[in-house]
Amino acid sequence: MHRILTSLRSLAPEKKVSRLLLASVLLGTIVGIAVSVLEWITLQLLLHSVDELPLVAAAFAPMVGLGIATLTLRTIGRGITPSTSDEYIRAYHQQSPYLPERNLVPRLISGMATIGLGGAVGLEGPAIYTGSVGGLRVARALRNWLGADNAKVLLTAGAAAGVSSVFQAPATGVVFALEAPYRDDLAHRALLPSLLASASGYFAFVSMPLVEAETVLPFAYDSGVGTGQLIGAVALGVGAGFGGRAYAWCVRKAKAFAAARSALYAVIGGGLLLAVLAGVSDRLAGSPLTLGPGLRVVEWLSAEEQAVGIVLVIFVLRALSTFVTVGAGGTGGFFIPLAIQGVLFGQVVGAGLDSFGLSTANEGLWPVLGLAAFLGAGYRTPLAAVMFVAESTGGGAVVPALVAAAVSQLVAGPSSVSTGQKIERTGLVEGKANSPVGNVLKPVVFTVTPDTTVYEFIHNLAIGQQMKTVPVVDGDVFVGLCTVAACANIDREKWADTLVTDVIDVDAPVGSPNWYLRDAMVAMGKGDYDVLAIVGDNRRFLGVVSAEDIVRLEEIIAATT
């Protein structure tokens, strides 16, 4: 018996791991409950009320929502941005993840007002932000019990629980949370805690009486895999890749517009545009399909066969509505909006493929493949997109969805609707190379003026301070670099009568304060200098970056040139 008990104990995880998994279950449960309340208020209370309004009132509801969102962020939020899921990604890439808890309430109010009153963005953004803040809060509260190095793991687990709850798709939540921080990598260390947090979040969500559990896509079938399906998947992948790239570019421009423009004009202008788009879509489709995240579009497509031209117009109007909502300062995510764009795109492409005889017995296949391709290309999360398709359709379309998502990734390039994503995980040396040049910038260094003689440079700095390279600065303007090697070419008898301006390299490379260390290292390597001057506007001297301040400089330069 003792031997059996010993064997069973050996199968149990370490105490620290067990505690982390228990904390993940607790976190997932809390997030699932919170997201159920969030969804009930946003979709079933607010957005449902907007749907019941006359068209004129419903069309102008987004303006009210944007006004509330902007006012909340500027007053209660003290001027914070409307970012939600991007905040999770940024926090993930911090050495010590941090999300101020005081920003949770204003961002949630902003998200509920934006989405609940008809803004064309998704609820997963506020849900991810809720889970992320909750994860860091649990990590901080249980620091002594869990250890000090689990904040990033619980941050990821909380985000997974948020996605799992809002979409009722536990596996999608896990994959998305692990895939979102990197375009070409996975945050694999948080896998097991994310699995448990996602599952517990899902069960907590569906157990709440506030909302009814339902899948986003009303499709469930076995599509089979044939030549027509695979050809269509490739075609959809190519089109969605270009479409996702254009969509991501527009989202980034909209975010920049929102940050640079007056909030009052943005809200009024954006609200008017959203009202016009709602009116146009109602005129064409019999319903204001541009309002809200877009789930109504799926119902519209499923109700009866729609003309391809109208579907294409709704595709454009939905995209414009999302861009306008973001440009007007709205708070929300892009998962569902991208998914809806994919469904519409798949419907259009499917009609074209059918005209060439590449039809399938199940007409719902093309919208599903379009979803996988467009969502994967826009968010750069192809695995999460395919998993979402699998969970939403009963698994029948997984193989062609994988093909569509893979092709769209190849075409989409580096674009993403998320501004905080990195390409892949970096090691210590690579991470150093990708850090801002300001991390090692020396603003106060020895310099010489143009009227300094070579003799003064050699005796006062080269010998006195053991400096081989010194910037020459006229007032605050950088002139060039003076080196010992250049001065050595001058006869000693002429040192006292020769100015440094006669020997300096006025074409020496200079760097920008916006550069990364990798850029500085490459510039130094090409110019064969151990110092790089950093200058601002009009060559204003800011300081230098030296080779001594960079770890293994020559090795990294060799790897990057």
Image: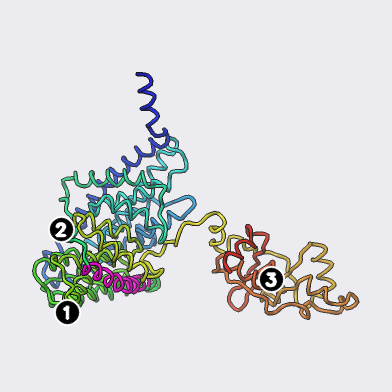
Neighbor class of circle 2 (other Cα within 10 Å; few <14, some 14-19, many 20+) is few
- Asked if residue 158 is positioned above or below residue 358 in the image, the reply reads above
SS for callout 3: loop
Q: Which residue lies furthest to the left in this view?
A: 304
- Asked if residue 100 is positioned above or below residue 316 in the image, the reply reads above
Asked if residue 221 lies left or right of residue 373, the reply is: left
Asked if residue 77 lies left or right of residue 525, the reply is: left
Q: In which quarter of the image is residue 245?
A: bottom left
Neighbor class of circle 1 (other Cα within 10 Å; few <14, some 14-19, many 20+) is few
Q: Which of marks 2 and 3 is nearer the N terminus?
A: 2
Asked if residue 532 lies left or right of residue 118, the reply is: right
- Return the x and y of residue 50 as percentages of the image width and height: 15, 64
Whether pointer 2 and pointer 3 mark residues with C-beta atoms closer than 8 Å, the reply is no
Quarter occupied by the C terminus: bottom right
- Asked if residue 376 is positioned above or below residue 102 in the image, the reply reads below
SS for callout 2: loop
Callout 1, which amino acid?
Answer: Gly
SS for callout 1: helix
Q: Residue furthest front?
A: 227
Q: Mark 1 points at which residue?
A: 309
Q: Name the residue under label 3.
A: 528
Q: Which residue lies furthest to the right in this view?
A: 493
